Image: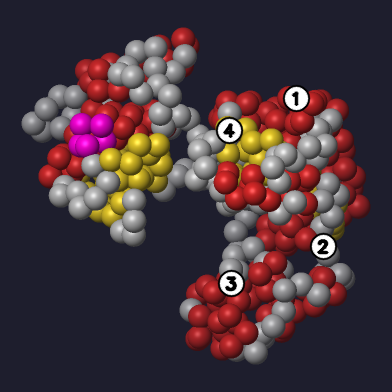
Amino acid sequence: MQKIILHIDMNSYFASVEQQANPFLRGKPVGVCAYLSPRGCIIASSQEAKARGIKTGCTVAEARRLDPAVVLLENEPAKYRSTTERIFKILAECTDTLEPYSIDEAFLDLRGWAKNFMEAEKIGRELAARIKNEVGEWLSSSVGVSYTKFLAKFASDIGPRGGMLVITPRNLDSLLAIRPLTDAWGIGRAMAERLKFLGINNLLELKNYNADKLKRVLGRWGYYLWANVNGLEISSVSRGSAPPKSIGHSYCLPKKTADKKYLSSLLYKLCEKTGRRLRDLNLEAQQIRIYASYIHDGGISKSFKTAEKMFTTGEIAREALGFLAKADLAMPISMLAVSVSRLVPVSGQLPLLENNSAKKGLSRAIDKINNKYGEYTVISGAMFGLNDLAKDRIGFRKTVGLAQL
């Protein structure tokens, strides 16, 4: 059976969702920001904003210098997630193997659903049209179709914005010959320089390079890059999102300070947000990393394995706040971050020294109340007065799973 993979990527997604929700923003330069403070970062910009040089990574201050008329909005994660769920429900009707790759893109394995690339192209155009008709007329998507995941994503990346590109063995070489190395998924500027040192200046030259020599110089990653452009399958489309390797939250402080009382309250809230996501996925963690960045270069951090698995906010906070209490702060802090890793499904095994099953049950009950009646309906006293700080934020990778659709 012909292997046919479709990749769909929503264009200027967060900004387009905002323009869809508010027609008065359509046709105007729009930037969606993590925070509206001058050093806040643009996480998505509309096509109109991109035309003025306002791109992802710009600060709010830079965006306003580039175009004083730019409309800057603080991100609303719930709005983007609900839109994504509607889009992915449409995608799920076209295949039984859908892999949400991020909040605004997904892979579809069309084997058994399309007989050939011509039928797959028709499905792709129908999907793009349905998204416009059923979710929002201002939402455009780029679609790529090929016979591996890499080439399908490559097709949507280099194809026309809001259009479609199909890559087959017949047109692969002609497309690779005109594309720079950095157009390939997984090749950044540093890797491109290493490849150029080997005499590889474009993707077709990478395809035709000796695979054994590439592997000797760059290791397994070199072979991975070579196999991708040669149309060899490295990874198949998996049903649903892969579980995360870590879960965490960071926050750039509006008030730069070395006051440990203030920092402890904020850090506790970051632990709560981390714990909520951990519990939503029914996972436990046994590694934690805490990081605090100074207002100038440098900062303090610590990563360590915990004696017991963490599940509740209190268990995470105990480790994080213990680190902060002992830390010697050389100057005011500008950013705090906490993350947990070594994630495993929650087990029913009880610890030897303490029965924390009641604490787990209480944490789940509080989560249910907050899910039903709104965030921070029930909170710990340690977070009192912090509702407007360290708000919910949106991530791009592995955000929506099939279980949520």
Q: Report x, y in % for residue 336.
A: 33, 43
Q: CA distance from mark 4 to mark 1?
A: 14 Å
Q: CA distance from mark 1 to mark 3?
A: 38 Å
Q: CA distance from mark 2 to mark 4?
A: 35 Å
Disc on the earlier residue, 1 or 3: 1
Badge 2: few (under 14), some or many (20 or more) residues near its Cα, within 10 Å? many
Q: How many marks?
A: 4
Q: Which mark is nearer the camera, 2 or 4?
A: 4
Badge 1: few (under 14), some or many (20 or more) residues near its Cα, within 10 Å? few
Between 17 and 71, the one lying in front of the other is 71
The answer to whether residue 27 is left or right of residue 61 is right
Q: Which residue is mark 1?
A: 22
Name the residue type under label 4. Asn
Q: On residue 167, which mark appears?
A: 2
Between 91 and 176, the one lying in front of the other is 176
Disc on the earlier residue, 3 or 4: 4
Q: CA distance from mark 3 to mark 4?
A: 29 Å
The quadrant where residue 236 appears: bottom right
Q: Which residue is mark 3?
A: 189
Disc on the earlier residue, 3 or 2: 2
Name the residue type under label 1. Asn
At 60% from the left edge and 50% from the top edge, which residue is drawn? 62
At 40% from the left edge and 28% from the top edge, which residue is drawn? 389
The rendered magenta stretch, by its main secondary structure, is classed as helix
Q: Which residue is mark 4?
A: 75
Q: CA distance from mark 1 to mark 2?
A: 36 Å
Q: Which mark is nearer the camera, 1 or 2?
A: 1
The answer to whether residue 253 is left or right of residue 92 is left
